[in-house]
């Protein structure tokens, strides 16, 4: 019975030792895979989203730098706001509760999705 227990212990120890050796041998291929992964990530294209609103337009700077437009969207946007009295006899300086804020100028916001 003692011999069976010792034999089973020896088998367990050899299994543990051989598993450690295989993981050590696998380290070298993992380094090569990491290098290949880094090379692929450098080859991937970069993407960026930029927004210009109310007459601003700086997209030509990005196009000159080598960026390409993938997608272009435009939305209506309020550029400036103005305060107006709620009634004719309202004094906005004395009574702040009668002041209403309304959109003054409405412009366009352009959203670009760029890729390099």
Image (spheres, rainbow, N blue to C red):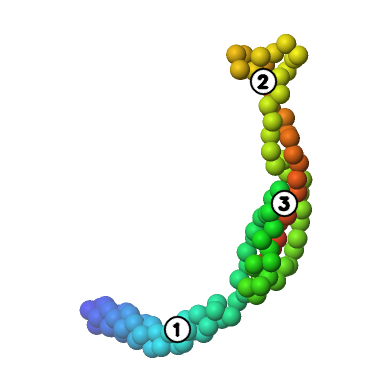
Residue 77, compared with residue 32, is above or below; it is: above
Residue 98 sits in quarter: top right
| Mark carried by residue 55 | 3
Quadrant, the N terminus: bottom left
State if disc 3 and disc 1 touch (CB < 8 Å). Answer: no
Residue 43, compared with residue 105, is above or below; it is: below
State if disc 2 and disc 3 touch (CB < 8 Å). Answer: no
Kindly state the secondary structure of the residue where label 3 is placed.
Answer: loop
Q: What residue do we see at 66% from left, 73% from top?
A: 64
Indicate which disc, 1 or 3, sits on the residue closer to the N terminus.
Answer: 1
Most foreground residue, 61 or 110:
61
Residue 108, compared with residue 115, is above or below; it is: above
Q: What residue do we see at 47% from left, 84% from top?
A: 35
Q: Please, which residue is most extreme toward the left here?
A: 2
Kindly state the secondary structure of the residue where label 1 is placed.
Answer: helix
Quick one: label 2, few (<14), some, or many (20+) residues within 10 Å? Answer: some
Residue 13 sits in quarter: bottom left
| Numbered disc in front, either 1 or 2 | 2
Indicate which disc, 3 or 2, sits on the residue closer to the N terminus.
Answer: 3
Most foreground residue, 59 or 44:
59
């Amino acid at each position: 019975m003692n011999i069976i227990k010792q034999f089973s212990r020896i088998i367990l120890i050899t299994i543990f030792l051989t598993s450690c050796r295989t993981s050590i041998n696998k380290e070298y291929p993992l380094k090569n895979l990491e290098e290949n992964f880094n090379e692929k990530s450098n080859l991937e294209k970069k993407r960026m989203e930029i927004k210009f609103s109310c007459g601003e337009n700086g997209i030509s700077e990005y196009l000159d730098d080598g960026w390409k437009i993938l997608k272009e969207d435009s939305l209506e946007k309020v550029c400036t706001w103005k305060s107006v009295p709620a009634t004719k006899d309202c004094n906005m300086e004395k009574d702040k509760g009668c002041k209403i804020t309304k959109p003054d100028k409405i412009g366009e916001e352009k959203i670009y999705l760029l890729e390099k």
